[in-house]
Image (cartoon, rainbow, N blue to C red):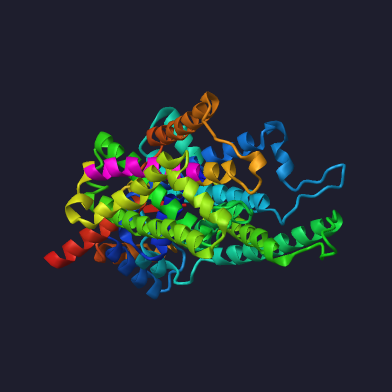
Amino acid sequence: MPRILGVFDMPGKTAAAIDQIRGRGYTDIVTYAPAPFTEVEDAVDPKPSRVRLFTLIGGLAGVTTGYAMTVWMANNWQLVIGGKPFSSIPPYTIIAFELTILFGGLMTALGLFVYGRLLRYEKDELYDTRFSAEDFGVVVTCQSRDVPELESLLRQHGAMEVNLVEA
Amino acid sequence: MFWVGIAHAGTLISAILFLFRAKWRNAINRSAEAMTVFAVLTAAQFLGIHVGRIWKSYFILPYPNQRGLWVNFKSPLLWDTFAISTYATISIVFLFVGLIPDLAIARDRMAGWRKALYTALSLGWKGTTNQWKAHNRTVLHLSGLATPLVLSVHSVVSWDFAMAIVPGWHATIFAPYFVAGAIFSGFAMVLTMMIPVRRIFGLEEYITDYHFENMARFILLTSTIVGYAYAAEYFIAWYSGVEAEQSAFWLRAFGPYWISTWVMIICNAVLPQLLWFKRLRTSVPFLFILSVFINIGMWFERYVIIITGLSREYDPAVWGTYTISWAEIGIVGGSFAFFSMFFLIFLKLFPIVAIAEMKEIAIHERAHSEEGAH
């Protein structure tokens, strides 16, 4: 299917163009941006990233591991101190807290790798080094018959350049 | 303890100021985060040095062994191990996550071995919608996780002392006192390093006097908290009527270590009060000189707490007077060299200003000015 690339210089114009394109029923839209711009990201997909699930799972795993590890180890190697219970929850809370942060943080980074599709070094013929400078790219995958409409839409919203790439 | 303290400004700037949406952090967060990582790595070496038998330092980790023996999680040393290793790991993750988009910018503009390095490290970043959305969320969550972490790490370090019954150490004020001291020393180190770096690399447009003034305000606030903690320690020693505490604090101020104590008080609690004057707060040469004095003062604070505490415990049979040896001077000097070396390598290889975050501000400003023109 053909893909159309529009190059913009402002986040506002980019977001407006995406809104219009989505309004016309096109859903396969990818953008490239030099920095985080919520207006552009929300125009493509207003739902928050699911990285938060990873954080939650990591945090819960951390707190569970923290308490389970300390209690189990204290009972496995028993230190007899005046007949007191072998495990003591208040000091173990410190270990559980630290592991909550540690596992939560590492899982959050893993979430970035998964949802950001990182560690994939494949070549992307639509990517341009301008997109890591100051320009924005909007790529729409469409049917051949839709190309003229999309081209005019992108230009209407101030695209500095529109290119057609056959896939 | 000194180096863990230095490590605190980075995460504070990155995480807490991020959550408070303080935009001024953008220019300085990268350098502060890098300092955090290198300061923690410097501090980590001391775990090995302090164990004495460095080849057995792994005994502190809970690992399965043939004796069926586990570590004692009721010991503050174990809390310290977990707190500092978590802090080191999260600081490295934070620094690296922030660097990824900037490494992609560098990748697109470099050639040769540098291009290969940045290509590998930028992990295939292209700045797509998914990537930025996930990145924003990751930075937000890491900030949320790192904020209580910053406060917990130096609290845990302080409990290494406060949990012991040594006079001068066994105090409930230790946790907030240490956290404020850590942030104080961390900001001072950021000033000591960034003032010359700004000059050498010509970064005046990005790191402005306004940034330095804001850091000076933080220094003033935390210096006041530290000064209050010093006063509270002396007051409680007097008011409690506990003789051992009273003599410990008398010894600090008028005993054989009086010079260290007065250097600490003057550098940390008195001199920073000059920052109430705007003229001084906005004078970069003054801030540089003051930051060096604060570094000296904070190093002496740790010296005073440890040395005066241990030189007079309850049992007079173990009393002694400490003098620093050439080997210890070498270790202290070496730690400064280790920290500076890694910081300079970082400066040489990686973007010292968060480029993508600065671009976000610049592009928004450009958009607003264009809208204003129409």
Image quadrant holding the C terminus of chain B, namely: bottom left
- In terms of image quadrants, where is residue A83? bottom right
Q: Is residue B102 visible?
A: no
How many numbered discs, if any? 0
Magenta span includes B290: yes
- In terms of image quadrants, where is residue B23? bottom left
Vertical arrangement, residue B13 with respect to residue B301, above or below: below
Vertical arrangement, residue A116 with respect to residue B190, above or below: below
Residue at the limit of the structure toward the top, as seen here? B326
Vertical arrangement, residue A140 with respect to residue A34, above or below: below
> Picture coordinates of residue B195 (x, y %)?
28, 41
> Picture coordinates of residue B220 (x, y %)?
31, 56
Vertical arrangement, residue B140 with respect to residue B302, above or below: below
Looking at the image, residue B27 sits to the left or right of residue B84; the answer is left
B363 vs B59, nearest the viewer:
B59
Residue visible at 64% across and 54% down?
Answer: B165
Range shown magenta? B286-304
Looking at the image, residue A19 sits to the left or right of residue B317; the answer is left
Q: Is residue B18 visible?
A: yes
> Picture coordinates of residue A126 (x, y %)?
41, 49
Residue visible at 42% across and 36% down?
Answer: B343
Looking at the image, residue B272 sits to the left or right of residue B264; the answer is left
B38 vs A130, nearest the viewer:
B38
- In terms of image quadrants, where is residue B294? top left
Residue visible at 41% across and 56% down?
Answer: B226
B228 vs B318, nearest the viewer:
B318
> Picture coordinates of residue A128 (x, y %)?
37, 46
B333 vs A36, nearest the viewer:
B333
